[in-house]
Amino acid sequence: MEENTPLVTVTDNMDASAAKYRQPSSAKAVFIVFTAVMTVNAVVQLLRGAYVIAFLSFILTIWYTVTAVKSLKNAADTNIPALMGHPNIFDFYDEYYVNTDRISRAQIRYDWLVKIKENDHAYYLYIEPNIYHYIPKSAVPPEKAELLRQLIYSCSAKNDFTDKA
């Protein structure tokens, strides 16, 4: 096979249905914990008789809740549709893959990956501990799915980092 011909090509059209798998769950966890702490603080202050502090704590909790919900909604509703129409193309070769998007092109060797995670919906190829390439399984041609798995896991014999998401 010619060197410039990819073994597998995956085109992620950034459809909105996959947006929920791209959202970081840590933001939601921080929101829940902070809201719970502020609510408990407001109730404690109310029971202690510090009505002004309790009132301010309730107001702060309400303001934070409204702001956080808007922020999470905007992250889900605007970021992914803004990228729609600008496909993310992954070309997989024997020893590396190339990610081409609307503003950049990156060539990543499989042995440079720091972690690989996989779930029912996607592959997550970590190029840094907190930065990954998202490859939806729905975008992988069915006849190339096993070949793709073999390629991305080819470095796992050298590195022990594979994980189920």
Image (tube, rainbow, N blue to C red):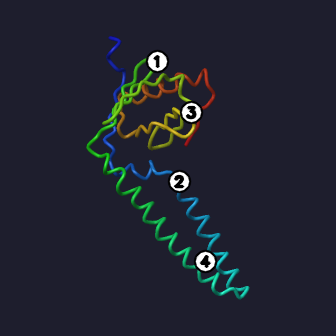
- List the single residue furthest toward the left: 85
Label whose residue precedes the other's in the sequence (2 or 4): 2
Q: Which numbered disc covers residue 151? A: none
Label whose residue precedes the other's in the sequence (2 or 3): 2
Q: CA distance from mark 3 to mark 4?
A: 42 Å
Q: Which numbered disc covers residue 57? A: 4
Q: Is residue 87 visible?
A: yes
Dot 2 and dot 1 residues touching (CB under 8 Å) = no
Dot 2 and dot 3 residues touching (CB under 8 Å) = no
Q: Position of residue 119 (x, y in %)?
A: 50, 42
Label whose residue precedes the other's in the sequence (1 or 3): 1
- List the single residue furthest toward the right: 48
Q: Amino acid at mark 3?
A: Lys
Q: Position of residue 134 (x, y in %)?
A: 44, 39
Residue 160 relative to residue 24: left or right: right
Instruction: For mark 2, give the secondary structure.
Output: helix
Q: Which residue is drawn at the image coordinates 53% and 56% (left, top)?
A: 27
Q: CA distance from mark 2 to mark 1?
A: 32 Å
Q: CA distance from mark 2 to mark 4?
A: 25 Å
Q: CA distance from mark 1 to mark 3?
A: 16 Å
**Residue that numbered label 2 is attached to:** 25
Q: Amino acid at mark 4?
A: Ser
Label whose residue precedes the other's in the sequence (2 or 1): 2
Label whose residue precedes the other's in the sequence (1 or 4): 4
Q: Position of residue 85 (x, y in %)?
A: 26, 43
Q: Amino acid at mark 2?
A: Ser
Q: Is residue 159 above or below residue 88?
A: above
Q: Is residue 35 above or below residue 15?
A: below
Q: Nearer the viewer, mark 3 or mark 4?
A: 4
Q: Nearer the viewer, mark 2 or mark 4?
A: 4
**Residue that numbered label 3 is attached to:** 115
Instruction: For mark 3, give the secondary structure.
Output: strand
